[in-house]
Amino acid sequence: MLTEEEKEEIRKSLKDVVHKREAVSDALKVVQRHRGWISGELPEVAEMLGMSPAEVDSIATFYSLIFRRPVGKHVILLCDSFCCWIMGYREVFEHLSTRLGVGFGETTEDGQFTLLPVCCIGACGVAPAMMVDEELYGDLTPEKIDSILEDYK
């Protein structure tokens, strides 16, 4: 069940659109920001937007950054674009995976981090790159990754 705060934020996003359904990704992001992921809220979101739950679900499953299952407190998006591959992606991935003890799509035992691949985060100039939550990090090395992860503990 959506909270009043979530409903109010969704209503605010509706003020900037011509058709309610234009706000579907914003509405899903509101729910995700409050809960960490989207679970059973789809029918309520759909009702607010004048859509069917299946339509909202199709949007939620299309975008890889809308999480349909629980994720860790912090989500690490590791860029696996061509630029990152030629600038050291494999070493970065292996270090992250070993350090966290997880592979792609998995969450650490303590629930702190979920590691996900992303096709491109638009940071080719600082490849290899990753995002932790909303923060971008580039020119990654194993030492830099260790320092970054310490800041999130």
Image (tube, rainbow, N blue to C red):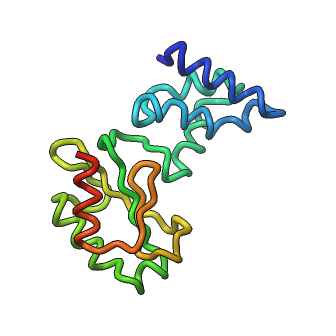
Residue under the image location 69 percent in, 24 percent down: 12
Name the image quarter holding the C terminus.
top left
Task: Left or right? Give the position of 58 relative to 76.
Answer: right
| Between 127 and 24, the one nearer to me in the picture | 127
Up/down of 90 relative to 112, above or below = below
Residue 148 in picture, x, y percent from top left: 29, 58
Q: Residue at x 35, y 77 (%)?
A: 89
Q: Position of residue 150 (x, y in %)?
A: 22, 53
What residue sits 27% from the left and 65% below the top?
Answer: 145
Q: For the view shown, which residue lies furthest in the right direction? A: 18
Q: Quadrant of residue 93?
A: bottom left
Residue at the limit of the structure toward the top, as seen here: 4
35 or 125, nearer to the observer: 125
Q: Please indicate whether residue 135 sits to the left or right of residue 42 in the image.
A: left
**In the depicted structure, whether residue 20 falls above or below residue 138:** above
Q: In the rendered image, which quarter is residue 21 located in?
A: top right
Residue 22: image quadrant is top right
Q: Position of residue 110 (x, y in %)?
A: 16, 42
Q: How many marks?
A: 0
**Residue depicted at 40% across the width and 59% down the height:** 77
